[in-house]
Amino acid sequence: MRGKAVVIVALMLAGCAKSDGGRDAPAGDAMTTESAASGSLDARGPGISLTAAPGVAFRYAYDFRIPAARISSTQEAHAQACEALGIARCRITGMHYAIGRGARDITASLDFKLDPGIARKFGATGIDTVVKAGGKLGSVDITGTDAGGAIKAIDQESARQRADLDRIEAQLAKLPPKARERVTLQEQADAIRQSLNANAANKGAQQASLATTPMHFDYGTTDSFAGFDADSPIAVGLSLGQQSFLAAMSLLTIVLAGGLPWALLALAGWWIWRRVRKRFVPE
């Protein structure tokens, strides 16, 4: 009877597991699985356009994942695209390329200064170049600084300081050359002039940030060998096989965990019965 009970419990557990596995997946999960299996995930990222924002200085940063053998050619293609625009619209301000311990361990980067009017299009074209090389967009970060607001605040502060400087200079003009107040007023005037110079430098930096848009391209290898990228059909198939194997092992663990105590109990009973039988029942 105990043996039959063990079998019944195991069958019930298997039926429950099959029932759970057969439930309909949420719509989002189903769409993700379908997209991954078909390899139709958009390697270009979301098609979101930035709203025009006068006075905002933007910075673009793209992280690409490309097969190791194509990083160098892709980096060169991006550099040539910038050079084709001319230095008035695009300038390369930095470049990095390094090979690690393995042939596939490659890191590279490019830095640009772009005409703000073409920055977003240049970034989108850069993504297309990566996709054509068999790569994909890892991430993109676009940040903005309110340079226009900063310039307005600097102008207001500078106007107030110039009014103070005019007042102090008017007082100095009325004082005798050896008046004691002249030293204090002169020090105040010098401090205001230094602050005005700092404001002018800060304003120039803010204006420069509006005149050009910095852009950074970072290149890294894909997370596996060529043809085994995470979105490839082979990788998706291996992932599904791994999940199926883990599910089977989980079910087996549940069955063993539920039946093992009964099996041990039956084994102990059989051993006790054998001992008792040898002692009290003659052979």
Image (cartoon, rainbow, N blue to C red):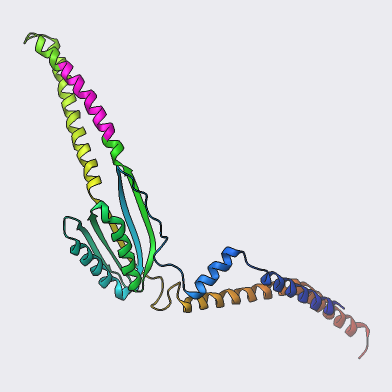
119 to the left or right of 185: right
Q: Is residue 80 above or below residue 142?
A: below
Q: What residue is drawn where x is 89% and y is 80%?
A: 276
Q: What residue is drawn where x is 74% and y is 71%?
A: 16
Secondary structure mostly seen in the magenta stretch: helix
Residue 155, percent from left and from top: 24, 31
Q: Nearer the viewer, residue 213 or 260?
A: 213
Residue 105, percent from left and from top: 33, 71
Q: What residue is drawn where x is 69% and y is 69%?
A: 20
135 to the left or right of 5: left
Image quadrant where one finds the N terminus: bottom right
* Region in magenta: 152-168
Q: Residue furthest bottom?
A: 283
Residue 106, percent from left and from top: 30, 69
Q: Is residue 269 above or below residue 79?
A: below
Q: Residue furthest right?
A: 281
Q: Answer whether residue 88 is visible to the viewer in this image.
A: yes
Residue 154, percent from left and from top: 25, 32
Q: Answer whether residue 103 is visible to the viewer in this image.
A: no
Residue 159 placement: quadrant: top left
> Does the magenta segment cover residue 160?
yes
> Does the magenta segment cover residue 12?
no
Image quadrant where one finds the C terminus: bottom right
Q: How many marks?
A: 0
Residue 64 placement: quadrant: bottom left
Q: Nearer the viewer, residue 87 or 239?
A: 87
Q: Nearer the viewer, residue 85 or 24?
A: 85
